[in-house]
Image: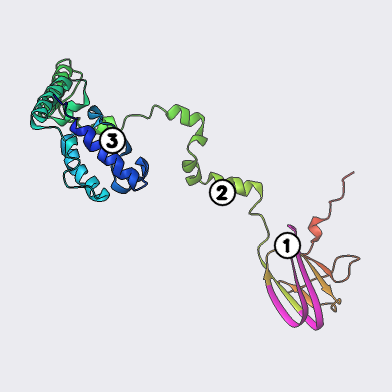
Amino acid sequence: MEAHEDPLLNAGRQLRQQREARGLSLRQLAIETRVSTPVLEALERGWRDRLPEPAYLRTMLPLLVQHLDLPAGALNGALPDRPERTQHNVSGRQALLARFTPGSIDVFTTWQGTVIYGGLTLALIYGVNLQQRQLAAENLLILRPIPPLSASEQRAPDPNAELLRAYPDLRPLQRAAEGVARQRLLEGGLERRPAAGVLQLRLGQPTRISLGSETGVKTELNGATGELVLQLRPPLRLTLNPVPPQGAVLWDGQPLAPEPGAAGRYRLPPTTTSATPLPVRP
């Protein structure tokens, strides 16, 4: 009695022959048909245990037949017959039941898993409720809102009053409001600068004017002529070149004399006689 060839081997042989006739490798055929290389190799070698599900095969085999110009139904031998499919479905249900364990991720993709998940959620809510009741029974949990403090309690003495009296600088904003910073500025002499004065120049010829402050700021004006009136804040040093005649420089309406031994140089404000040292008493 002649033995019949496995339909899967026959289909695999036709697939391999047509592929090699077109000069295609498994990799190239997989790229062109979007069928993975392991599946193509399993078809050609007759590895039934490495083939995908029948539903996938029914979609994949017509694509291979059309792409390689094979006769219609040439690869149907790769499909299992009906008894095998029935047996496969039964084994699949048994495998699903075998995988149904609380520690398996498949439990969340079935209705049984939904029931278990819902039961666990209800159990957690019930446990939290019991815990809250136990805390309330032990007077560790207040279910009523906390009332506000009374007027007498709100005016309770500050426990840090002694510390603030010992170290008042701990409240710098309060110190600033009391004028402490301004008082220190006054004590430091920062506001003892002379008030602004008026400098009046009567220049009969183009003159170079140079003003310099104690901080090094210098201002120059070239070719000034005529009468100039400037409001300035001393102390300043004024230099005029060429030297103007006597009475051409006035400070607050009073003629300003040049510095001794330095013609054309003036000090604003001018030095007074009160600045000279007093004689020593015998």
Label 2, residues with CA under 10 Å away: few <14, some 14-19, many ≥20: some
Magenta-drawn segment: 202-230
Residue 28, given in percent of the width and then of the height, sits at 36, 45
Return the disc, 2 or 1, that comes first in the chain's sequence: 2
Q: Can you say whether 112 is above or below 64 in the image? A: above
Observer-side mark, 1 or 3, equals: 3
Q: Please name the residue shown 15% across and 16% down the image.
A: 134
Q: Please name the residue shown 66% across and 65% down the image.
A: 196
Return the disc, 1 or 3, that comes first in the chain's sequence: 3
Residue 30, given in percent of the width and then of the height, sits at 32, 43
Query: Marks 2 and 1, how far apart in space?
Result: 26 Å
Label 1, residues with CA under 10 Å away: few <14, some 14-19, many ≥20: few
Residue 116 is inside the magenta segment = no
Q: Please name the residue shown 21% across and 33% down the image.
A: 8
**Residue 2 in view (yes/no):** yes
Label 3, residues with CA under 10 Å away: few <14, some 14-19, many ≥20: many
Residue 159, given in percent of the width and then of the height, sits at 39, 26
**Three-letter code for the amino acid on which mark 3 is drawn:** Glu
Q: What element carries label 2?
A: helix
**Three-letter code for the amino acid on which mark 2 is drawn:** Arg
Judging by the rendered image, the residue that carries numbered circle 3 is 44
